[in-house]
Image: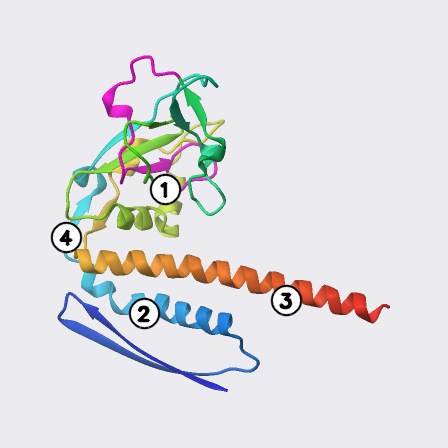
Amino acid sequence: IYLFFSFILLVNNEKSYIFVVSIRCEHVDNREIVILIVELIILSRVCIIKEIMNKKVTLKDITMMQSGIYMKTDSQGEVRYLQVKDVDPESRLDYTQVATVINTGINDKHWLKKGDLLFAAKGGSNYCILYEGAERSTIASSSFIIIRPITSDVLPEFLCCFLNTPSILGMLKSAAVGTGIQVIPQSVIGEIQLDIPSIEVQKLVVEMDRLRKEGECIRSEIDILKQSLQDQLLMDSLK
């Protein structure tokens, strides 16, 4: 079976890249085809790297940054209090078990706003997540550094993808301090340099990241199904 894929990437409405790929496959199901397409789109990032190098800034130039706040949880509280435990393995916020705190006069700057980024700076697991909840309903614990974009030139979703890049996380981990629990200083995060592409390219990067995650989920499901089938065949052979 030969699969032919062709697609066009437009960058800044000016340049286009045409890809035509032929792949020989055997015993391919629809989900595996989807994975192949997703992987091809991700690989196409190589062709747009040169297009996004147009405005180098530091993170502190385009965002406001501050640490979360430590508060004692209270089951009678009315304010949601996000902690590291509330983030699932796919780096998504899970609100089902979020603790609460009592509002004893929380400063306005601590209330999370839609589009805020929460960077887990403490401990061995570091990542960035996007807050998309309601305003004046939730605060973040001191395990997070809150990063709030202050310019319309950059999408919060793009910044989140950028900060989750393995090379960036590796660089930040190497700058962590502390003999017990390692902490990445806010000042170090603020000095990260990045190139701001056009909004169109930022949206493209965000979409490719979404497709990558979707492809990983599909691949995981296929692996589980294959393992289940293998186990079933083994059990049947023993009967």
The structure residue drawn at horizontal position 45% and vertical position 33%, both measured from the top left corner, is: 84
Q: Residue at x 29, y 14 (%)?
A: 105
Q: Which residue is mark 2?
A: 44
Of badges 4 and 1, the one in the foreground is: 1
Residue 89, percent across and down?
A: 50, 45
Residue depicted at x 19% and y 52%: 196
Side of 113 where 43 appears, left or right: right
Label located before the other in sequence (3 or 2): 2
Query: Looking at numbered disc 4 in the image, what kind of residue is underneath it?
Result: Lys
Tag 3 residue:
226
Quarter location, residue 227: bottom right
Q: Which mark is residue 55?
A: 4
Please report the bounds of the magenta region as a residue range: 102-129
Name the residue beneath numbered marker 1.
Answer: 129
User: Of the residues shown, which amino acid type is indicated by label 1?
Assistant: Ile
| Amino acid beneath label 3 | Lys
Taking 16 as reference, is 111 above or below it?
above
> Where's residue 143, x and y in %?
40, 29
Residue 84 position (above or below residue 214): above
